């Protein structure tokens, strides 16, 4: 299956706990960190929840 690269571009400070937990689930904990995950509908939902903090890299 296809993979997708996700990069954290904004800080998690002063964010609600559910957004922090979503970033943890994605494997992101520092600004400019890039992770590669399998592209699934549940992953797309997590990205949509924190889309203001992350960037999808092609």
Image: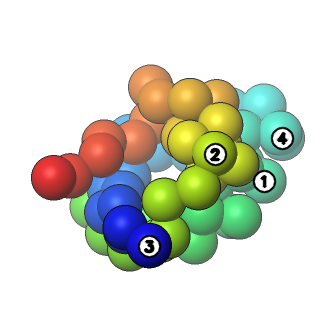
Q: What residue does disc 1 label? A: 21
Instruction: Indicate which disc, 3 or 1, sits on the residue closer to the N terminus.
Output: 3
Q: What residue does disc 3 label? A: 1
Instruction: Indicate which disc, 3 or 4, sits on the residue closer to the N terminus.
Output: 3
Residue found at the very far left of the displayed protein: 58
Pointer 2: residues within 10 angstroms few (<14), some, or many (20+)?
Answer: few
Tell me the residue at 70%/48% (across/down): 42
Figure check: 12 above or below 45: below
Pointer 1: residues within 10 angstroms few (<14), some, or many (20+)?
Answer: few
Q: What residue does disc 4 label? A: 17
What element does badge 3 sit on?
Answer: loop
Q: Position of residue 2 (x, y in %)?
A: 37, 67
Residue found at the very far right of the displayed protein: 17
Residue found at the very far front of the displayed protein: 1
In the image, taking residue 7 as reference, residue 17 lies left or right, namely right
Q: Nearer the viewer, mark 3 or mark 2?
A: 3
Figure check: 34 above or below 23: below
In the image, taking residue 42 as reference, residue 44 lies left or right, namely left
What element does badge 4 sit on?
Answer: helix
What element does badge 1 sit on?
Answer: helix
Real-space Cα separation, disc 1 to disc 4, in angstroms: 6 Å
Q: Nearer the viewer, residue 43 or 27?
A: 43
């Amino acid at each position: 299956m296809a993979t997708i690269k996700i990069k954290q571009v904004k800080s998690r400070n002063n964010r609600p706990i559910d957004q922090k937990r979503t970033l943890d689930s994605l494997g992101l904990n520092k600004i400019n960190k890039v992770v590669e995950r399998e592209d699934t509908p549940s992953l797309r939902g997590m990205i949509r929840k924190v889309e203001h903090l992350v960037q999808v890299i092609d």
